[in-house]
Image: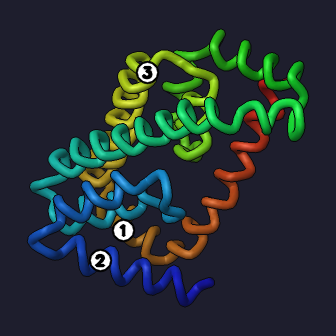
Amino acid sequence: MRQSTTRLYNWAMQKANSEKAPFWIALLFALELVLFIPLDAVLMFFCLQNRKNIFLYVGIAAIASTLSGLIGYLLGHFLWDLIGSYVVPHFISTAFFNKISLQFQHYEVWAVFFGSLLPFPLKALSLTAGVFHLGVLPFVTYMALARFLRFSLVGVAMVIWGESVKSFVDRHFHRIVMVIGAKVAMAFFFFWAIAH
């Protein structure tokens, strides 16, 4: 595991120093739906290597991440129409599904905003929003706002504490990657919490 995280670290540093850094940021965050890497840490690397472009990178990351979330939303929306009748009631009860749906729709704006702001898995958030047919415009709007705020905080942290943060990430990159497992656990806890 440590060897693969070291390779990821070296790859990110190499791309952050390339002329195509904006392209790599756009690509990585557009693929956020399918990647299992800590993109906030990757954004830090890019910002630290090109400080004059910090807020360009923040904007690119926010737009690309929102587009990735929209793809997840559409997948959840249309795939559920195809397979939903097989999942409910065969894998989860109709009552449980309806309870989650009502909770999600009741807290729609806050669920999307805080789910996008906090280190909650984009995959779970966007697919679930699509499955429960949340409004697409509120979903995109609040996801974009939260993503821009989240990545702006990363950018501001790099402006103020850049070298200290870089030193911390250099020493603990392996542990940061392990946080991904915690994000998955948070997704399961989220579903459990709204069902109770």
For the residues labelled 3 and 2, the Cα–Cα distance comes to 36 Å
Q: Residue at x 55, y 89 (%)?
A: 3
For the residues labelled 2 and 1, the Cα–Cα distance comes to 11 Å
Q: Which residue is mark 3?
A: 136
Q: Which residue is mark 2?
A: 13
Give the answer, above or below, for where 147 lies relative to 10. Answer: above
Q: Is residue 87 left or right of residue 3?
A: right
Tell which residue pokes out farthest to the top in this image. 106
Q: Is residue 35 left or right of residue 195?
A: left
Q: Earlier in the sequence, mark 3 or mark 1?
A: 3
Q: Earlier in the sequence, mark 2 or mark 1?
A: 2
Q: Nearer the viewer, mark 3 or mark 2?
A: 3
User: Tag count in the figure?
Assistant: 3
Q: Residue at x 76, y 43 (%)?
A: 188
Q: Secondary structure at mark 2?
A: helix
Give the answer, above or below, for where 2 lies relative to 148. Answer: below
Give the amino acid type for the residue marked by disc 1 in the picture.
Lys
